Structure formats: structure tokens, C-alpha cells
Amino acid sequence: MEFSLCSLDGALPVEVTVDDDNGRYMIRKSDTSGEYFNTPNELIQWVRTHLNEEEFCQPQEFRVMLDRLNEYQTTGYYL
């Protein structure tokens, strides 16, 4: 599951990746720095703590991403 969100503070989008098949759980911020996590739950908690919808061009995209991450955390599946 990958998300690319247009950020108001940079030219590059914020990229959020949850890849169970390859064990990749990471975020690339709009300034090209990043965060890497050992588990998807760590990534989801970081997103909840450090990002908010006002930082993005399309706040609805952020809310959709949060909904999908919450569903994944609850069920263990994503579509």
C-alpha cells in the first residue's frame, strides 16, 4: 500500500509505504528526508502523531489514507 500526498511545504509529495511482502514501512517527507519503521504499527503511530491534514494540498487524501491505515491496523488487510 502506497500513498503519495501533495504537501503544501515542498515540491515533492509525501510518500507513505506499507509493504508487508518486502518488510518496508517508510515515509519520505516533502524535504526528501525520511523515516523507517520496523512494523506497520510504528509507521501508523508516527503518522498520527506527526502529520495532520492541514499540511496537504488535498486534506481529503490525507483522511482517506488515515482511514485505510486504520482499517489495515484493525484487520491486517488492505485493498
Image: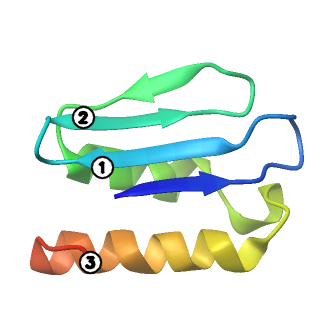
Quarter location, residue 24: top left
**Which badge, 2 or 3, comes first in the chain's sequence?**
2
Residue 54's image quarter?
Answer: bottom right
**In this picture, residue 41 sits left or right of residue 30:** left
How far apart in space, not on screen, are marks 1 and 3 (Cα)? 12 Å
The answer to whether residue 53 is left or right of residue 50 is right
Which of pointers 2 and 3 indicates the residue nearer the eye? Answer: 3
Residue under pointer 1: 18
Residue 79, given in percent of the width and then of the height, sits at: 26, 77
Q: Nearer the viewer, residue 60 or 54?
A: 60
Which residue shows up at 28% across the image and 32% down it?
A: 37
The N terminus: image quadrant: bottom left
Residue under the point 14% across and 74% down: 77
* Front label number (1 vs 3): 3
Amino acid under disc 2: Arg
Q: Amino acid at mark 1?
A: Val
Q: Helix, strand or loop at disc 1?
A: strand
Q: Position of residue 70 (x, y in %)?
A: 33, 75
Which residue is denoted by mark 3 in the rendering? Answer: 79
Crowding at mark 1 (Cα within 10 Å: few <14, some 14-19, many 20+) = many
Q: Are marks 1 and 2 in contact (CB under 8 Å)?
A: yes
Query: What is the CA distance from the residue labelled 2 to the residue labelled 3?
Result: 17 Å
Q: Answer with mark 1 or mark 3, whichever residue precedes in sequence.
A: 1
Separation of disc 1 and disc 2 at Cα? 6 Å
Q: Name the residue carrying label 2.
A: 24
The mark tally for this picture is 3
Q: Taking 36 as reference, is 76 above or below it?
A: below
Q: Position of residue 65 (x, y in %)?
A: 50, 70
Please state which amino acid type lies under the numbered disc 3: Leu
Secondary element under disc 2, as helix, strand or loop, is strand
